[in-house]
Image (spheres, rainbow, N blue to C red):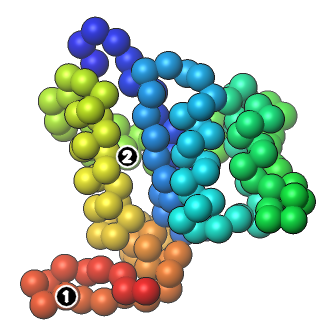
């Protein structure tokens, strides 16, 4: 962006590729990562397992505390020892798609712009964008398991 950076974190369901939450910040502090994790848990519940890279934000006590169930039990963690691109291949693929299909196609001048275009694009990504790896279904179809065609010809997922 002109005059600075905007850092983005996403919480993804690895099986369905659904983006459960996304958050943005002009710094790399852990707070915006914790907020994204809290939003994902609030909306979708506790996962059975979490996988994160070795970034400080994701290894912080504050971040990991989010993933304790209502009884205080810590949810299983997974991470790989080496920092290689294959460690988080599905998330890395998402970031490439996000940049090329969302960010690089729009004029972005502020963090507010990033948040606005990202929110709209994530809605499209989860509800309408077909994924070859998902058998040409959307992340919402896989996550929720139901496809519905609306009167105006759009494919949406109904709960």
Q: Could you tell whether 130 is left or right of 94 in the image?
A: left
- The quarter in which the C terminus is drawn is bottom left
Front-lying residue, 22 or 131: 22
What residue sits 20% from the left and 28% below the top?
A: 108
Residue placed under numbered mark 1 in the picture: 150
Mark earlier in primary sequence (2, 1)? 2
Alpha-carbon distance for marks 2 and 1?
26 Å
* Number of numbered discs on residues: 2
Residue 135 visible: no
**Label 2's element?**
helix
Q: Could you tell whether 112 is left or right of 95 in the image?
A: left
**Label 1's element?**
loop
Circle 1 residues within 10 Å: few <14, some 14–19, many ≥20: few
Q: Could you tell whether 20 is left or right of 47 in the image?
A: left
Q: Could you tell whether 85 is left or right of 115 in the image?
A: right
Residue 136 visible: yes
> Residue 33's quadrant in the figure?
top right
Front-lying residue, 99 or 58: 58
Front-lying residue, 7 or 62: 62
Camera-side mark, 2 or 1 = 1
Residue at the front extreme? 71
Residue placed under numbered mark 2 in the picture: 97
Residue at the left extreme? 152
Image coords of residue 74 (percent x, y):
87, 55
Circle 2 residues within 10 Å: few <14, some 14–19, many ≥20: few
Image coords of residue 23 (percent x, y):
46, 41
Image coords of residue 46 (percent x, y):
70, 65
What residue sits 59% from the left and 23% below the top?
A: 29
What residue sits 49% from the left and 63% below the top?
A: 18
What residue sits 54% from the left and 54% below the top?
A: 39
């Amino acid at each position: 962006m002109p005059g600075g950076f905007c850092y983005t974190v996403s919480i993804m369901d690895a099986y369905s590729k659904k983006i459960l939450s996304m958050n943005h910040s002009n710094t790399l502090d852990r707070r915006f990562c914790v907020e994204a994790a809290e939003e994902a848990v609030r909306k979708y519940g506790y996962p059975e397992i979490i996988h994160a890279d070795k970034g400080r934000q994701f290894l912080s006590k504050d971040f990991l505390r989010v993933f304790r169930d209502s009884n205080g039990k810590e949810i299983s963690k997974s991470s790989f020892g080496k920092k290689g691109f294959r460690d988080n291949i599905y998330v890395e693929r998402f970031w490439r798609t996000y940049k090329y299909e969302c960010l690089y196609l729009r004029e972005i001048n502020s963090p507010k712009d990033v948040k606005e275009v990202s929110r709209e694009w994530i809605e499209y990504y989860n509800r309408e964008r077909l994924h070859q790896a998902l058998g040409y279904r959307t992340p919402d179809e896989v996550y929720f398991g139901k496809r519905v065609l609306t009167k105006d010809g759009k494919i949406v997922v109904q709960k």
